[in-house]
Amino acid sequence: MTVELSLFCRAGRSLSWRKQKSVLIHEALTQDPVDVETLRAAAVTEGGLLGQEVRRRVWPKLLNINVFSLPAKPGPAIRTNHRDYNQVLMDVRRSLRRFPTGMASEERSVLQEQLIDMILYVLRSHPELHYYQGYHDVAVTLLLTVGLRLGTAMLQTLSTHHLRDFMDPTMERTRCVLSYLMPLIQSESPALHDFLLRSEVGCIFALSWLITWYGHVLSDFHKVLRMYDFFLASHPLTPVYCAAQMVLLREDEVLQGDCDLPTVHQLLSTIPNDFPYETLIARTHSLFQRHPPTQLERQTSLQRLKSISSSSSFRSLQISSAQQRPDFVLRQQVTPTSDVLPVRSQNTLVKLAVWGISASLGAAALAVTQTAMEWGPDLLLGLF
């Protein structure tokens, strides 16, 4: 029996599927070493990771991040003379739609400042990485879900693995990732592939999907989080497989329209509000299994420049993830003299209070604090 199927068969029949999945996730998190394969399966299968509290437990494990050994909170010096500061500042200032509707401007300002520091911390820590417009869309999703310090750690790992192709000084490797799109469509529907070629639409319509993990184009934050569950648990090239499957699911709609660039580009650039995301994820997972990257890369057009994200470094991440200790063990390894967690500061507490008690932010902040309190009060302060 596959791990995916066993998620719905091992627990008692009297439990609902959500309770059953929750139990299995808890069991996987408390095993020593952590059962990362079950966590990946949970993130991929229907419903994903169920909710924010579970995500804050599972997302770090998917990236092999020790929540008791997080990067230091970025300080003011992180902004000094940084080559990308002005561009990051402009992009973050324009990102109002990515924050909860109705949030007070003071609270949003605090989060925007944290978002700037979060991005610059990663870029300063890795000078080989180059900022791109859309990177802040990934960062803000992490910030709103897990807080500043854990979000920074996650962004750092994603930047050196899953997002690495997009962070070269040129867009050459980004074009390389996009070049997987048409061969994938052709493998499933030659007729649709030929229609797209005749329309000369190219692949640019999918660019913002890939570089933001769909965060920029989906207005429903819950749908964004569901996609992040899937991508964090999957191969770095999965977003381009998802783009191909998104087009394939609209094949009839595409073929019924005019075969010209403006018509096709407009159609594909607009994602319907009622798009079946669970179907999309399930079919994308199946598409990846039928046509893995190694198979596609044998084609002449994909041989010249290979994806960095799909290199052996990702395999190393997978192997190291399988050796993680559960949080109750990691907590015991934190020594009283360790500089892992920040000193309690009045400023930290004030910012947390401003964010946490706000009715406009609502359940998102409450879930962050509740989950962090389960790890311990010190970690609660560390997240922010």
Image (cartoon, rainbow, N blue to C red):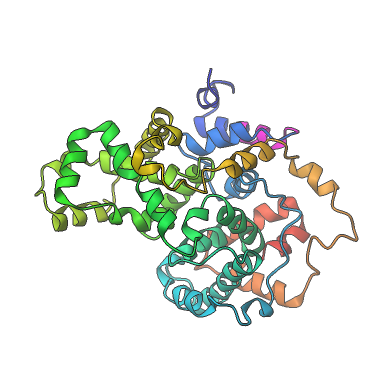
Q: Give left or right: position of 46 versus 315.
A: left
Q: Residue furthest top?
A: 1
Q: Is residue 53 above or below residue 129?
A: above
Q: Hey, which quadrant is residue 350 in on the image?
A: bottom right
Q: How many marks?
A: 0
Give the x, y percent position of residue 23.
62, 32
The quarter in which the C terminus is drawn is bottom right
Give the x, y percent position of residue 226.
46, 46
Q: Hey, which quadrant is residue 293 in on the image?
A: top left
- Residue 41 sits inside the magenta stretch: no
- Residue at 61%, 58% in the rendered image: 156
Q: Hey, which quadrant is residue 288 in on the image?
A: top left
Which is more toward the observer, 270 or 78?
78
**Which region is colored magenta?**
24-32
- What secondary structure prevails in the magenta region? helix
Q: Is residue 212 visible?
A: no
Q: Is residue 42 visible?
A: yes
Which is more toward the observer, 218 or 301?
301
Which is more toward the observer, 329 or 133?
133
Give the x, y percent position of residue 54.
59, 45
- Residue 30 sits inside the magenta stretch: yes
Give the x, y percent position of residue 8.
52, 25
- Residue at 67%, 45% in the rendered image: 64
